[in-house]
Image: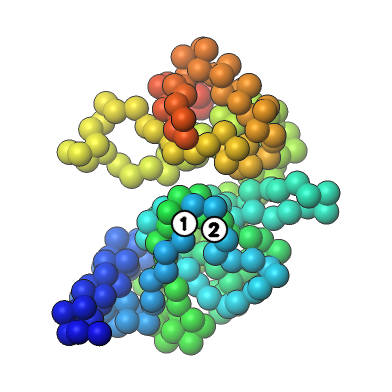
Amino acid sequence: MTDAAAGHEEAERTWCLAEVDIFCDLSEQEMEAIAAAAPMKTYHAGEILYSPTQPSEVLFILKKGRVRVFRVSADGRALTTAIISPGTIFGEMVLLGQHMYDNYAEALDDTVVCVMSRTDVHRLLLADARIAARITAILGRRLADLEQRLSDSVFKTVAQRIATTLTTLTSAQPPASPLRPVGRHPQIALTHEQLAALAGTSRETCTKVLRDYADHGLLRLARGRITVLDPERLKEAAG
């Protein structure tokens, strides 16, 4: 590898971490040390990042794309336990009390992650009180989200679960910028089959519910994309 190529790769690794919340106030030198220990990996939509059949103790730092964490019941039904957005962490890391158990992690989009080993997590993350505290907060929020999802799966109708999932994905989008003005309607890049899997229903039922929401002016449907026209009414529909 040439010096120029090596420099570009190092810059890419630093870029991978630069906007991750838990690293928000690190110095450039501290960031470079972490980036050097966290190689980047790219996964295409639908690829599995983590599987209980091939467990490994690694921490994923999500830079780009979305990741679905799910488990499969004995009768083959999939229950989504988390939707991971850019700027946060997931994976199997006993040091952090972070467990995947029997969960799978699947890329919903083309995804870029940085991957850290147990040794580097201990050396670079847990040794820094700022980062350790932020990781604890993230894991606490994720546990609360999981409890809410399990409650939704029992007490909410399919239509409410679909509305809840769309509302969650909309709220996870980045804030408005000059390139993405406030007035633009939020768009979610998901097929009906992907959304059905997230909401714990069949594709046919999901399509029927989406068409009903579209007929009532809450959504606009296109191939592989859902535009939320009325976020407030959709939130009400989520119950």
Q: Quadrant of residue 201?
A: top right
| Numbered tag placed on residue 44 in the rendering | 1
> Is any atom of residue 43 visible in this view?
yes
The quadrant of the rendering that contains the N terminus is bottom left
Q: Is residue 211 above or below residue 43?
A: above
The quadrant of the rendering that contains the C terminus is top right
Q: Is residue 86 above or below residue 224?
A: below
Residue 148 place in picture, x, y as percent: 63, 44
Q: Please state if 122 lies on the left or on the right of 148 as rendered.
A: left
Mark 2 lies on a secondary structure that is loop
Q: Please state if 79 lies on the left or on the right of 129 as rendered.
A: right
| Numbered tag placed on residue 106 in the rendering | none
Residue in the image at 63% along x and 21% along y: 208
Residue 222 place in picture, x, y as percent: 45, 26
Residue in the image at 70% along x and 70% along y: 53
Q: Which amino acid does the dot numbered 1 rest on?
A: His
Disc 1 versus disc 2: distance between alpha carbons?
Answer: 6 Å
Q: Residues within 10 Å of mark 1 (few under 14, many from 20)?
A: some
Residue 120 place in picture, x, y as percent: 44, 84
- Farthest residue, direction top: 216
Q: Which amino acid does the dot numbered 2 rest on?
A: Glu
Q: Are marks 1 and 2 in contact (CB under 8 Å)?
A: yes
| Numbered tag placed on residue 47 in the rendering | 2
Q: Residues within 10 Å of mark 2 (few under 14, many from 20)?
A: some
